[in-house]
Every structure is written in C-alpha cells, then in structure tokens.
Image (spheres, rainbow, N blue to C red):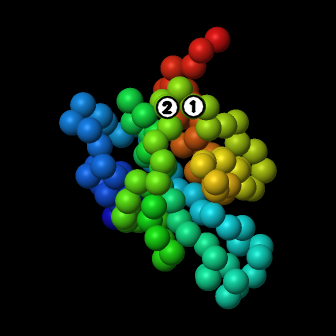
C-alpha cells in the first residue's frame, strides 16, 4: 500500500462522522541534517490530515509516518499551510516546527487550494 493511502486509512479513525479527508501528508520534528544517531533519538513523525472541516495533526511515533497513534493538534480549516519552497517547508504547530519534505509540497498546495480563506 502506498504511503499516502496508509496515512489516509489510519487517519480515518480520528474523523467526525461528517468529515472526509481531502489531503494527507507527512512531516517530521527534526532535520535529517543533525546526524544519524541524534536524528533517530530526537525525531518524531507526524501526519497532517486535511479534511473538509479542519486540519488534524496526528502523532505517528518515532519509526515512520504510516500509522497514526494520537491527535496532537487541531487547526481551523482556514489555516494556510503554504506556500512551500526549498527542500523542507516548516509549519509551526503548537511548540513544534514540523518539517515537510518537498515530495509533499503538491499536497500542501492542494490543501490550500481546497481551503476557504478570508480575503
């Protein structure tokens, strides 16, 4: 199963009955540039599940972003996540700076395109 499909499936258990996932993408708490062992010890993975009603930030643990294990934050659907640029895009959520790799930039763009933003 593809990564995005796994993230979407596991996020479903955290949704309200009226919600549907529009976009999912992964993030991590640390930069891979800090080095091997230190990265493994300090990094945690996150899943952004963007629905028609809100944006959920889900914890997916230390070993990967396929399976959600809890809700960390809930953002209003009107929250703009991009524009993303460079190799890593940083999205601040609560007290964490979540780093999103460029492979998920199209998902950030789709999330922002589907959002309802005030002028």
Q: Using the image, determine if residue 112 lies above or below residue 92.
A: above
- Secondary structure under tag 1 reads loop
Question: Which image quarter: residue 96?
Answer: bottom right
The tag on residue 76 is 2
The picture places residue 9, in percent across and down from the top left corner, at 30, 54
The picture places residue 78, in percent across and down from the top left corner, at 53, 26
Q: Which residue occupies the foreground of this view, 5 or 32?
A: 32
Q: Using the image, determine if residue 41 lies above or below residue 46.
A: below
- Residue farthest toward the left in the current orientation of the protein: 17
- Residue farthest toward the front in the current orientation of the protein: 95
* Mark 1 surroundings within 10 Å by alpha-carbon count, few (fewer than 14), some (14 through 19), many (20 or more): some
State the residue position of label 1.
Answer: 79
Name the side, left or right, on which 15 lies relative to 109: left
Q: Using the image, determine if residue 3 lies above or below residue 21.
A: below
Mark 1–mark 2 contact, CB under 8 Å? Answer: yes
Residue located at (66% from left, 47% from top): 91
Residue located at (77% from left, 76% from top): 34
Residue located at (70% from left, 83% from top): 38
């Amino acid at each position: 199963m593809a990564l995005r499909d796994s993230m979407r499936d596991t996020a479903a258990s955290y949704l309200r009955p009226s919600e549907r996932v529009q976009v999912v993408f992964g993030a991590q708490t640390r930069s891979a540039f800090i080095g091997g062992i230190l990265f493994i010890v300090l990094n945690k993975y996150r899943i952004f599940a963007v629905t028609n009603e809100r944006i959920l930030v889900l914890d997916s643990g230390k070993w990967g972003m396929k399976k959600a294990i809890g809700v960390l934050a809930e953002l209003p659907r009107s929250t703009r996540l991009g524009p993303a640029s460079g190799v890593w895009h940083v999205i601040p959520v609560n007290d964490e700076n979540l780093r999103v790799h460029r492979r998920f930039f199209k998902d950030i763009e789709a999330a922002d395109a589907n959002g309802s933003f005030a002028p």
